[in-house]
Image: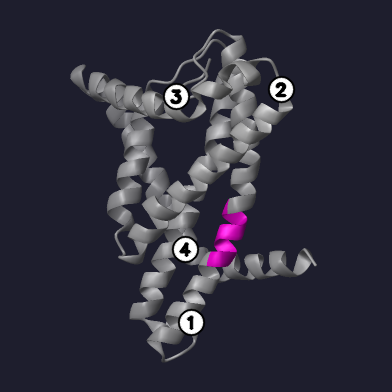
Amino acid sequence: MISKPLSRVWGTVSRLKTLMVAVGLLYAASIGAGIVTGRLMPAAWPDNLAKEEQNKVEQIERIFGRFREPVREGQWSAVLTASGLVFLLNLSGAFSQFTVLSILIVPASFLGLAGWMQGMSLAQIHGSSFFSVFLYLFMGSLEWITYPLATVAGLNVGLSALFPKRQGTASRWLAFKQAWRDAGRLYLLIAMILTVQAVCEILYVRQVLLHGGSGVPLAPY
């Protein structure tokens, strides 16, 4: 029962691998450019980045603030509930911010900007230990790799509508529908990755809390 959907996911990934590689390279290059920019940028730029991160903290606090103490204490009901919320937020964010915009074939502008901003944040990264930084990057990378996947899902829909032969048909409507089927399979993969990521994030948040942090993992403890 499980192997059949997974084989379909693998078939879709194999068929779209060229597009995935291209988008993945764009994303990696954007992150690299952001890291270089972050190391060389004027002193005022980190301040602006810090203000943006502070806004993120405030938004996250409104949603997850009530889970801080239960998660710190290791209450599994709170850990699982918070993990579920992280999963839903990340999944909806991937769809709205990457897939939908990429249907309009603008992944270079948005994914590139997202990677660049992420790279600038990584350029400022530091933690209390190598292990802390490693766990932070591991947790974050599980989410970050879904961005190119979500972008490919949307980009494939847009390209298939323009070039239906990508889907082996002359009908734009049929190609459009088939591309959404591809997107559904990619989102099954994205959902599996984000499920693991959400649990890892909340467990990492607990470590942040135990080390005296705020519980918002925008940087290593």
Bounds of the magenta span?
184-190
Mark with earlier residue (4, 1) = 4
Picture disc at residue 132:
none
Mark 1 vs mark 3: give the one in front: 3
Label 2 neighbour load within 10 Å: few <14, some 14-19, many 20+: few
Mark 4 vs mark 2: give the one in front: 2
- Residue nearer the viewer, 120 or 160: 160
Q: Is residue 32 magenta?
A: no
Is 155 rendered above or below residue 111?
Answer: below
> Dot 2: what SS?
loop
> Dot 3: what SS?
helix
Image-based side of 129 in relation to 179, left or right: right
Q: Residue 207 occupies which quadrant of the picture? A: top right
> Dot 4: what SS?
helix
Answer whether residue 130 is visible to the viewer in this image. no
Q: Residue 119 occupies which quadrant of the picture? A: top left
Which residue matches tag 2? Answer: 75
Spatial distance from mark 3 to mark 4, Cα to Cα? 31 Å
Image-based side of 2 in relation to 221, left or right: right
